[in-house]
Image (cartoon, helix red, strand yellow):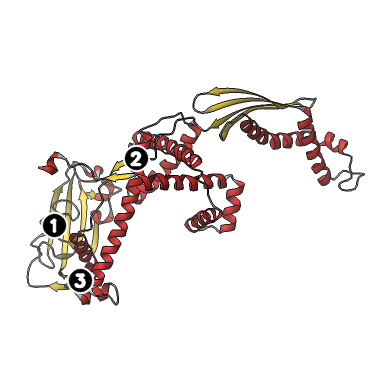
Amino acid sequence: MNVALDYQPNCVVALDIDLPADRVGKEWNSVSKEFQKQARIAGYRPGKAPVALIASRYAKEIEEEVKGNLVREVISEASKAHNLKLTSVEEVTEVVIAPDKTMKIRAKIAVTPEFQLPDYANITVEIAKKTIAEEDINGMLEYLREPHAQFDTVADRPLAMNDFAVLTYEGTVEGKPLGETAPTAPVQLQGRHNAWVLMSEGTLLPGFARAIEGMEAGQQRTFTLDVPASFPLPELHGHTVTYSATLHGINTRTLPPIDDALAAKIEPGSTLESLRQKIRNRHQESADHQFEAQKKNSVIEKLLSQFDCELPERAVAVETSSILKEIVSDSKARGISDDDLKSHTDQIVENASQSARDRVRANFLLLAIAAKENITETEAEIYQAIYELSERHKVPIKKLASDLSRQGGMGRLREQIRISKALDLISSSATVVEPAATPAAQA
C-alpha cells in the first residue's frame, strides 16, 4: 500500500492511497463468495452458481461493497502506519477500482493536534469557599415554614400591604386586552378571576399593589400604570396599562413559630435542633459540590490560558451545535421566547462557537494528559456510564449499548471517562488559595 500525505490547516491531512491488486482481489473474492451464498440463479441450486458468474452478474453491487469494506479499513491502517492520531474521516473524495483490481483512495482525515503539554502538576487557582452561616440555616427554615402558614379572613378593615387580596382584574392597553399588545405576557399580568394576590411592591406591574391599597371587599377600582423601561417585558415598554379590579376578600397570613412542632411537620421525627443540623449538612454538601465544580473549571481555564493549538473545524462545529441546543433548551425552560432568542442570534452563536473551541481544546488536552499518565477506563466504569445514560434517557441498557457500538459511540464514551479521570487527577493536585481582598473590602 502506497500512501502520500498532504498536511493541511486545522488538523486536516489529505491521504492519497494506492492499494495493490492482490489486496483488492482478495476482498473481491470474499465478497463474491458471500453473494454466491445468497444468490438465486435459474439452473443452479442455491449457493452453487459459479463464482465467475456471480462476479459478472453482480459486478456493480460487489464493487460497491468492496469499496465500502476497504475504505475505512485502509484509512485506519494508513493512519496507524504513519503515526497519525485519527479523530474522524472528514471526506472521501475519490474511490476507484481499476480493471486490474488496483484501487485508489483519496480522502481527508482530521487528526489530533500537536502541542506541548503545559505544567499541569503545579497549578494554583483562586477560589472562595463558602462558609455556611446561621443566616443560611434561618433562611431555609423561613422558606420551609411558608407552606405551613395559616390564613385568616379580614372583614373589619381595608386592604393593606402584605395582605392577600382575592381579586378579579383585567389589564388593557389602549382599550384592547393586554395580551394583544404583549402576546408573551404571563396570564398573571393579563388578568385573572378570584386570584390570590400578595400585596407587595414586586407584585405584577410596579405600582399595582399601591394602586389597590385601601380597597374594601366588594369595591371596584380602575387605575393606570406606566410601564418602565426596566420592566422585563419589552413589548410593554412605553405603554400605559389600564386595570379594572374588583376586590372579593382580604386574607392575612400568619406563619407558625419555628420550634420543635414545626420541625416535626417539616420532617417527621425531627426536633428543631436536628432539623437545623440536617439543613446545615445539606448546605455543606451543596457548597462542597459547588467548590469542586469551580475548582475544576478554574483549573481548565488556567491550563487553556497556557497553550494553544489548531482544532479540527468539524469537531468544533459539532460541539457548537450541541452547545446551541443546550442554550435553546435552557432558555425555553426559563421562559425566554423564540423572538428574544432570534433577536440575539449573532451573539448567541458567537458565544457558543467560542465555548465550543474551548471545550474541544480542553478535551484534547485532557486526553493527552490521560495518555501521559496512563489513565484508562475499566469495564466497570464503562458499564456505570452506560447505566447512567440509560437511566437519563429511559432507554434499555442492552439497546443503548448496541446503539453505541453500532454508531461508534462506545469510543467516545471511553474518551469521556478518560477525560473525566484526567480532570479529577489534576484538580486533586491543584493548590487553592483565597482570592485577594479588593481595596474596597480591605477598607
Contact? badges 2 and 1 (CB < 8 Å): no
Mark 1 or 3 closer to N-term?
3
In front: 442, or 36?
442
Give me the C-alpha separation between circle 1 and circle 3. 22 Å
Which element type, helix, strand or loop, lies under badge 3? Answer: loop
Which element type, helix, strand or loop, lies under badge 1? Answer: helix
What residue sits 81% from the left and 37% below the top? 29
In front: 341, or 167?
341
User: Residue 63 at what x, y percent from top left?
Assistant: 75, 33
In this image, 61 relative to 211: left or right? right
Few, some or many residues within 10 Å of mark 2 (<14, 14–19, 20+): some
What residue sits 21% from the left and 76% below the top? 260
The answer to whether residue 94 shows anywhere in this view is yes
Closer to the eye: label 2 or 1: 2
Q: Which residue position holds label 1? A: 209
What residue sits 11% from the left and 56% below the top? 211
Mark 2 or 1 closer to N-term?
2
Q: Which residue position holds label 3? A: 149
